[in-house]
Amino acid sequence: MLRPSTQNRPGTAIALKLLAVFLFMVMAAMIKAATQNVPAGQAVFFRSLFAMPIIVVWIWQRGEIREALVPNNLMGHVWRGIFGTTAMALTFGGLGLLPLPEVTAIGYATPMFTVILAAVMLGERVRLFRISAVGLGLVGVMIVMWPRLSVDTLGTATTIGALMVLGASILRALVQIHIRTLVQTEHTAAIVFYFSMTATLLSLLSLPFGWVIPDGRDLILLVGAGLIGGVAQILVTSSYRFGGASMLAPFDYASLIFAALIGYVIFAEVPTSATVIGAALVVLGGVLIIWRERQLGVDRRKARQVTDPKG
């Protein structure tokens, strides 16, 4: 079983979550810069491989080596790895084709798809309020994506990038649904460790499709992305030891602020009006879903503790 939250320290919890969100955006920026020259599958390999030492040290420090290495549902971890690795590869591919704020905004569709898949796959009852919130969020996603789906841009690299990120959002929702089942038998340490391991191995399947020898700059970016991503993943998990999931979930949306700042400073990207308006609707829909789940007493803490690594 997962460790329960040991202390109620909301200030610490929020600080850890915000730092994790910021580091995930730094990691995404590093991946975006590297994938101008390096294939997305190769970026997934570096992201996963170099996160593993950080994760192993964290597991050892918590005294959970045995729990991490002895799974109860090995095939469950394999499927989680397949879904999560594919989502990561699609996100990394999208990062190489789209502005960072746009990728971030489209990625916010994940909670909307999670509600839909929970109703279809888990039989959860979804009433009018949550249906309306999901609809609002999906309208926002379409507003963000619409410039990429016009007749003039259809079939271009940016359209492909937008569809890749949308596909990644759907797969991440599937991961969340899968994790809700997996946490019933698997320890957090096992889920985190086996995902990093399976993602590293699965990414090798992309080796025949154009891996390159990265130059010094790209190598630093790729290795740094893996290390930073591993630290960010641990910070997210640690934040839930000091605060509840329903309190911390809205802080995920701080990533749009960080994405806009990093995108502007590093890549000279300015969010379009469509991105700003659409993202606002997606965030509103997501916050309404979080609020409603809290009102209904729906506990997503275990699933959120095992956050799918961001891309």
Image: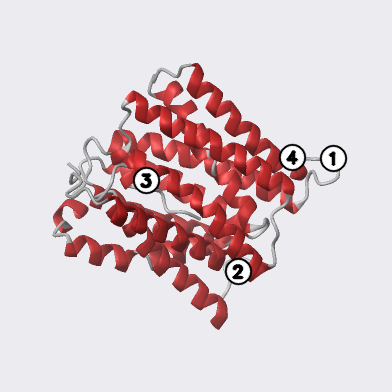
Tag 4: Cα neighbours inside 10 Å, few (<14), some, or many (≥20)? some
Q: Which residue matches tag 4? A: 146
- Residue lying at 50% horizontally and 78% vertically, measured from the top left: 220
The residues tagged by marks 1 and 3 sit, at their Cα atoms, a distance apart of 40 Å
SS class, disc 2: helix
- Check whether the beta carbons of the residues at disc 4 and disc 3 lie within 8 A of each other: no
Tag 1: Cα neighbours inside 10 Å, few (<14), some, or many (≥20)? few
- Residue lying at 54% horizontally and 33% vertically, measured from the top left: 285
- Check whether the beta carbons of the residues at disc 1 and disc 2 lie within 8 A of each other: no
Q: Which residue matches tag 3? A: 248
Q: Is residue 88 visible?
A: no
- Under mark 4, the amino acid is Trp
SS class, disc 1: loop
SS class, disc 3: helix
**In the rendered structure, which disc, 2 or 3, sits on the residue that comes first in sequence?**
2
The residues tagged by marks 2 and 3 sit, at their Cα atoms, a distance apart of 29 Å
Q: Which residue matches tag 1? A: 151
28 vs 62, left or right, is right
Instruction: Tell how many labels.
Output: 4
- Residue lying at 56% horizontally and 61% vertically, measured from the top left: 208
Of marks 1 and 3, the one in the foreground: 3
- Under mark 2, the amino acid is Ala
| 306, above or below 116, in the image | below
Q: Position of residue 147 (x, y in %)?
A: 77, 44
